């Protein structure tokens, strides 16, 4: 395969600037295009104002700003020339693309499907569900997403599964820390999707063997990495339906043990008792019991850490990029 097998240019639509996993993944795909040698235009809302916006800490964001094959333009000025290839993830952008195109894109329109909720007719007034009926090329980010959309999706053009990669190396480099036996088990959790962590911490009461660390505001990646490195366990608090749920994978990359419920998409990488302890969704006693098991069992902690380290090696951006290149070549053929 050669560079000539790829499109000369590609248009990538970003829904908003933020640290949400779906946005980060679109930026990853934009970088894949540029690294593959494709002239890439990113169409997005106005860039963040102020140097302290957390999105500016994203390594992929900074690399894209300086890449000579990348142009950034405002989404409300969207132009799609004849023969273009377009990648988008936000369902409402489909109408923008229809209005901006000069000819039907057919298989050159690529929908990046990142959530199991696309198969839920009631979600988002059914927009995501209805979009699955429209003919276009699709990339789904996990086998779990592929399974739930399979009965619905229009197969006039191909549906490709590219299991999500991530910049896991960024979260590595954990410094040496005192052993858990010399202090309390440090448990990190976030609060923006669920109050489960707060409820588990409250149920633990004054237990001197557990220390809970809550993250209540969005953090830039450097700060987030530091929080991961300061924790022994990450108590995941995903929503009931998730496309992939990056925090669990990031925690594994950062050398923390993961406690989580299974919520669809995260089954792409969570393996019960091999790289994580699986608890019952939104069940305080189940999550607290998992934490106490980890506190009391050093061998279990070591085994799950080793399993997590092995897991992250399968979720590289390089592997994702190579598979995406194959999809683009199939569209060109």
Image (spheres, rainbow, N blue to C red):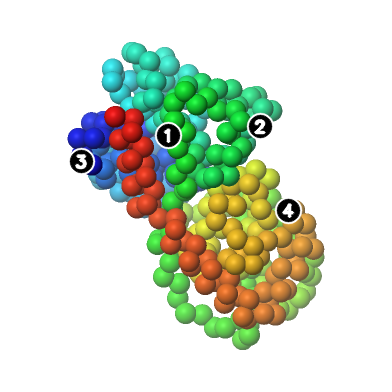
Where is residue 7, by image quadrant?
top left
Q: Earlier in the sequence, mark 4 or mark 3?
A: 3
Tag 3 residue: 2
Q: Is residue 195 above or below residue 77?
A: below
Tag 2 residue: 120
Whether pointer 4 and pointer 3 mark residues with C-beta atoms closer than 8 Å, the reply is no
Q: Position of residue 284 (x, y in %)?
A: 77, 60
Q: Earlier in the sequence, mark 2 or mark 3?
A: 3
Q: Is residue 205 above or below residue 147?
A: below
Looking at the figure, which quarter contains the N terminus? Answer: top left
Whether pointer 1 and pointer 2 mark residues with C-beta atoms closer than 8 Å, the reply is no
Tag 4 residue: 281
What residue is rendered at 51% in x and 21% in y? 134
- SS of the residue under disc 4: loop
Tag 1 residue: 14
Whether pointer 4 and pointer 2 mark residues with C-beta atoms closer than 8 Å, the reply is no
Q: Earlier in the sequence, mark 1 or mark 2?
A: 1
- SS of the residue under disc 1: loop
- SS of the residue under disc 2: loop
Residue 234 left/right relative to 281: left
Pair 4/3: label in front:
3
């Amino acid at each position: 395969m050669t560079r000539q097998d790829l499109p000369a240019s590609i248009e990538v639509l970003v829904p908003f600037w933020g640290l949400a996993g779906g946005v980060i993944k679109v930026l990853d795909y934009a970088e894949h295009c540029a690294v593959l040698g494709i002239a890439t235009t990113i169409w997005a809302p106005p860039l963040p104002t102020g140097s302290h916006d957390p999105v500016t800490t994203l390594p992929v964001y900074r690399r894209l700003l300086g890449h000579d094959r990348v142009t950034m333009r405002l989404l409300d000025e969207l132009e799609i020339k004849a023969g273009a290839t377009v990648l988008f993830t936000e369902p409402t952008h489909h109408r923008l693309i229809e209005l901006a195109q000069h000819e039907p894109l057919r298989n050159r329109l690529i929908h990046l499907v990142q959530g199991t909720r696309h198969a839920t007719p009631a979600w988002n007034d059914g927009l995501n569900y209805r979009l699955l009926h429209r003919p276009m090329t699709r990339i789904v980010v996990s086998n779990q997403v592929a399974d739930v959309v399979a009965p619905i999706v229009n197969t006039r053009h191909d549906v490709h599964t590219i299991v999500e990669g991530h910049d896991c190396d960024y979260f590595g480099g954990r410094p040496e820390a005192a052993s858990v036996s010399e202090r309390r088990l440090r448990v990190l959790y976030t609060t923006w999707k669920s109050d489960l962590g707060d409820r588990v911490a409250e149920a633990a009461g004054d237990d001197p063997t557990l220390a809970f660390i809550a993250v209540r505001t969005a953090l830039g990646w450097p700060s987030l990495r530091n929080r991961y490195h300061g924790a022994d366990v990450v108590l995941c608090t995903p929503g009931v339906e998730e496309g992939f749920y990056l925090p669990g994978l990031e925690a594994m990359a950062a050398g923390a043990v993961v406690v989580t419920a299974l919520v669809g998409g995260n089954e792409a990488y969570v393996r019960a008792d091999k790289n994580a302890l699986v608890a019952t969704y939104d069940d305080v006693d189940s999550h607290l019991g998992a934490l106490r098991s980890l506190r009391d069992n050093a061998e279990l902690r070591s085994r799950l850490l080793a399993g997590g380290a092995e897991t992250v090696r399968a979720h590289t951006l390089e592997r994702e990029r190579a598979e995406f290149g194959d999809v683009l070549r199939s569209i060109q053929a």
